Image: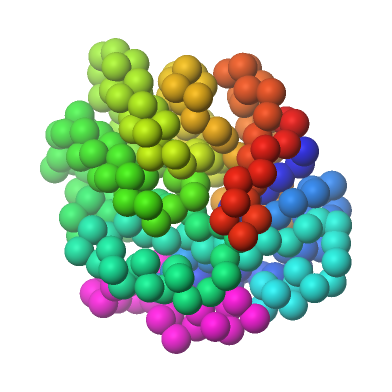
Amino acid sequence: MMIDLHIHTARCGHAAGRPSEYVAAARQAGLEVIAFTDHLALPDGYDPDGEYAMRPGELAEYVADVRKSAATGGPPRVLLGIEADWVPPYRAQTARAIAAYPFDVVLGSVHFLGDWAFDDPRLIDEWSLRDVAGAWDEYFEVFTQAASSGLFDVMAHPDLVKKFGHVPPGDLISLYDDVAAAMADAGVAVEVSSAGLRKPCREIYPSDDLLAAFRRAGVPVTTASDAHTPEEVGSGLGEVRAAVARAGYESIVYFEAREMREVPL
Ligand SMILES: [Zn+2]
Ligand SMILES: [Zn+2]
């Protein structure tokens, strides 16, 4: 089934286009199910320029916008989603925002190590001050914590830490198996995203090795573009679906009222 479970709109401050434009592009691309997943507002101080996420007061308007698109019938079927950052001190605040609306799907993501937005190109210099292996360990520790928090249905861009091409040397398989086992224990699904193909790492999130570890652990997967313009909806989905098939998956999942639905790839 052609699914794109991760789509942004202009509301998040760093994407372009209205929901109706994304829906039209998705129809054109032959997608059957899409989810809007704009960024939930971040805690005070984490988004000083308003470029990472919607404003705290915008959630109701965002929900109304997506519902309007969903009401047009489709195809594609339009789901109400949200991408929520895992910022540990703000767990309760995040949980409250998620509980306030009847979301179909909640994506969990890690864009911060402490207060460093490690995937922001403007903050890339910080990478030269860091030990790459240390940053990876920290990232996957936080990512695993997020998955186990009970807040999220799907963990987004699982190896986002490689975005600019910083990858530690050596064998990563045992790290990947530990991450996959934690996802399986947490009962979350993981996203296979084409976004990395458009970034300096030029690789799907997750890598083939990490995806293989998810498969070994029996972690369900969904497919996504992380589109930030209408033209990006469904982009790279062919490569994503090929990677999913190569890893041995025959089915993928999406969520409806936060219930997992398994469908043939
Ligand atoms: Zn993200
Ligand atoms: Zn996103």
- Is residue 49 on the magenta stretch? yes
Residue at x 68%, y 29% (from the top left corner): 251
Residue 48 shows in the view: yes
* Between 35 and 13, the one nearer to me in the picture: 35
Above or below 236: residue 172: above
Q: Is residue 227 visible?
A: no
- Asked if residue 227 is positioned above or below residue 92 in the image, the reply reads above
Question: Count of labels shown?
Answer: 0
**Is 101 drawn above or below residue 184 in the view shown?**
below
Q: Indicate the quadrant containing the C terminus: top left, top right, bottom left or bottom right.
A: top right
Q: How is the image coloured?
A: rainbow
Q: Residue at x 43, y 80 (%)?
A: 55
Q: Which picture quadrant has residue 176? A: top left
Q: Residue 256 placed where, x, y %?
A: 65, 55
Q: Position of residue 131 (x, y in %)?
A: 15, 34
Residue 121 within the magenta-colored segment of the rendering: no
Residue 224 location in percent, x, y? 61, 45
Q: Quadrant of residue 145?
A: top left
* Near-viewer residue (36 or 199): 36
The percent position of residue 45, horizontal first and vertical second, equals 24, 74
Q: Residue furthest top?
A: 171
Res. 23 image quadrant: bottom right
> Residue at (44%, 86%) from the top-left corner?
57
Front residue of 48 and 60: 60
Residue at 70% in and 54% down: 34
Where is the N terminus found, in terms of image quarters? top right
Question: Which residues, given as a range, are shown in magenta?
Answer: 43-64
Residue 179 placement, left or right of 24: left
